[in-house]
Image (cartoon, rainbow, N blue to C red):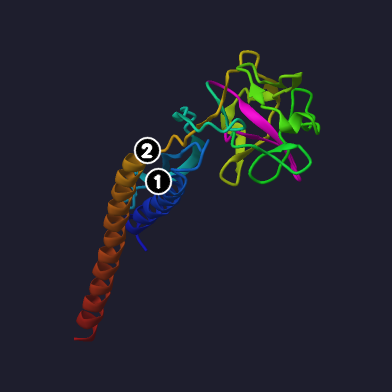
Amino acid sequence: MDNTSYIALSRIDALTRALDVTSNNLANANTDGFKLSRVQFSDYLSKQKDAQGTGAEKVIHYAQDRATYKDQMQGTLRQTGNPLDLALNGDGYFTVRTPNGIRLTRNGQFHRSNDGTIVNGDGDPVLDDQNRNIVLGPQDQILPLGVSSDGTISTEKGAIASLNVVDVDNENTLKDEGNHLLNPTTQTHQVTAKEVRQGMLESSNVNAIAETTNMIRIQRAYDLNFQLVQTESTRRLNAIDKITADASS
């Protein structure tokens, strides 16, 4: 296989990764708190000696998948009216306790479990600013629940807990776990100026039309590169057949 095919195949590999990421973005266009991913590519330069022995070098550019990162642009906040639907306006993440440890999320679709614990959709307890589960007492469970902009949860009897809203210095170090949980692989710190909106949810920041257009563009580039590999393979096979025919004649 010659350099043309290798270059095209490197591009196909990169486009396959881009197609997977874009497909996942589209699949989560309606997932609350979801942040779309982007793929970053670069050229891998390979220097090769001139086959004529002149000492000159030529540089071959291969496509290289460097990284996948999150677009942290905030999604639209929409009204739901559910008192335990919470959204963050600005920086920060809610914290929940999972079987694998504390995780972060922007999806604030919470509810009360049977024992009064405030949990997410997976049943993971939501944490307060002391990293404790937020549990409503028997009397609190029957009273209207209020959540102030600073994250204080209260009833008419008084404050119950304060939501733990944290941030990380480098959001690119967060690792996805499912479609709404993030594993903080670096140190977290509490957000001092948090802004919690009760009765609202943050929509996904995926623009479905833009991502569909991007998918079509990726698919066309993939098809062009695949055709190039096929054409180059056919050309080489024809050349071999011609050489074999000339040698036997």
Measure how far apart labels 2 and 1 are at the Cα level.
Answer: 27 Å
Secondary element at image label 1: strand
Residue type (three-letter) at the residue carrying disc 2: Asn
Residue type (three-letter) at the residue carrying disc 1: Ala
Is 53 situated above or below 132? below
Q: Which quadrant, please, contains the N terminus? A: bottom left
Q: Which quadrant, please, contains the C terminus? A: bottom left
Asked whether residue 161 appears in the rendered view, the answer is yes
Tell me the quarter of the picture where residue 188 sits.
top right
Name the residue furthest bottom: 249
Estimate the x, y position of residue 31 in percent, counting from the top left: 50, 42
* Residue identifier under label 1: 63
Q: Could you tell me if the residues under marks 2 and 1 are in contact, i.e. CB atoms within 8 Å?
A: no
Point out the tag, 2 or 1, that comes first from the N-terminus. 1
Whether 136 is among the magenta residues is: no
Is 129 situated above or below 232? above
* Residue identifier under label 2: 207
Report crowding for label 2: few under 14, some 14 to 19, many 20 or more residues within 10 A (C-alpha).
few
Is 173 situated above or below 159? below
Is 154 situated above or below 27? above
Asked whether residue 58 appears in the rendered view, the answer is no
Q: Main secondary structure of the magenta part?
A: strand
Residue 237 is left or right of residue 111, and the answer is: left
Q: Residue at x 37, y 51 (%)?
A: 11
Estimate the x, y position of residue 109 in percent, counting from the top left: 59, 37
Tell me the quarter of the picture where residue 131 sits.
top right
Estimate the x, y position of residue 86 in percent, counting from the top left: 58, 29
Name the residue furthest top: 193
In this view, the residue in front, 169 or 247, is 169
Magenta residues (range):
90-107
